[in-house]
Image: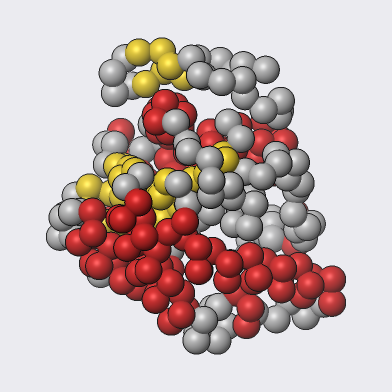
């Protein structure tokens, strides 16, 4: 099934998907776009055109004040991927010491949920050692003032440009049989990653690092989640 053409606002051109999209309706796409780690195919290259299509979809996301500050650094060079992977491994080793933050240290308080948490932790640990093995790494960034110490409104507005765009990128990737995983662990060593790919640290803030690869199989399922009413506050907190 081919999806509708994707219009790139940057160049005004229609981008027709270069391959058939997965037969997912909107709710299936939203509920099965998982953090993929162990099921990333590290051996299969990702065509540049597919990446462009995902970025074109990302550019259709909301942006504060219609000011598109989102930028994507696409890393295909093997040595740079290896270097970023090593930084990620070092940052991940620090993350593992953070009790209550590290995924494996979080107690779900119920046996079935705890087993799911352990599986997620095993998967996250795997990526901690293999981030640099992905055929493509994607750094989502925001250009302009950094949010370090910024007032809440400014920080939320600036991040509100790039965060929806990154999620749209991931949804577009899923529709094309590609896997992603939202990670922020490397931000503990953001400067080191900036140096590897020449990002001007003072004016460009990294927000997310994701691997990008074809998935081994495409049969992802919705995750177990609490009922909606467990997080809804009707009319008051």
The N terminus lies in quadrant: top right
Camera sees residue 87: yes
Q: Position of residue 106 (x, y in %)?
A: 65, 79
Decide: is 141 above or below 121: above
Decide: is 82 above or below 74: below
| Residue drawn 41% across the image and 13% down it | 14
| Residue drawn 62% across the image and 43% down it | 215
Direction from residue 170 to residue 122 in the image, left or right: right
Q: Nearer the viewer, residue 214 or 21?
A: 214
Q: Nearer the viewer, residue 18 or 200?
A: 18
Q: Position of residue 58 (x, y in %)?
A: 43, 34
Direction from residue 213 to residue 138 in the image, left or right: left
Query: Which quadrant would residue 99 be assigned to in this image?
Result: bottom right
| Residue drawn 60% across the image and 74% down it | 103
Camera sees residue 207: no
Q: Position of residue 107 (x, y in %)?
A: 70, 81
Q: Nearer the viewer, residue 66 or 165?
A: 165
Query: Which quadrant would residue 89 be assigned to in this image?
Result: bottom left
Looking at the picture, the colour scheme in use is secondary structure
The C terminus lies in quadrant: bottom right
Decide: is 27 above or below 152: above
Direction from residue 6 to residue 21 in the image, left or right: right
Direction from residue 9 to residue 227 in the image, left or right: right
């Amino acid at each position: 099934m081919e999806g509708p053409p994707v219009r790139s606002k940057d160049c005004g051109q229609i981008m027709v998907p270069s391959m058939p999209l997965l037969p997912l309706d909107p709710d299936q796409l939203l509920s099965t776009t998982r953090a993929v780690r162990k099921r990333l195919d590290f051996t299969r290259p990702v065509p540049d055109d597919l990446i462009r299509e995902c970025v074109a979809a990302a550019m259709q996301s909301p942006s504060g004040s219609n000011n598109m500050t989102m930028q994507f650094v696409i890393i295909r060079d093997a040595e740079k991927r290896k270097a970023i992977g090593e930084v990620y491994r070092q940052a991940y080793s620090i993350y593992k010491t953070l009790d209550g933050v590290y995924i494996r240290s979080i107690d779900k308080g119920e046996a079935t949920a705890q087993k799911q948490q352990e599986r997620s932790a095993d998967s996250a640990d795997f990526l901690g050692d293999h981030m640099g093995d992905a055929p493509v790494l994607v750094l989502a960034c925001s250009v302009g003032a950094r949010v370090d110490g910024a007032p809440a409104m400014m920080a939320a507005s600036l991040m509100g440009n790039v965060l929806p765009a990154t999620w749209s990128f991931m949804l577009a990737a899923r529709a094309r049989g590609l896997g992603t995983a939202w990670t922020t662990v490397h931000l503990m060593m953001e400067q080191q990653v900036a140096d590897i790919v020449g990002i001007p640290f003072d004016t460009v803030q990294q927000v997310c690092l994701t691997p990008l690869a074809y998935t081994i199989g495409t049969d992802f399922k919705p995750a177990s989640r609490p009922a909606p009413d467990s997080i809804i506050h009707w009319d008051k907190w």
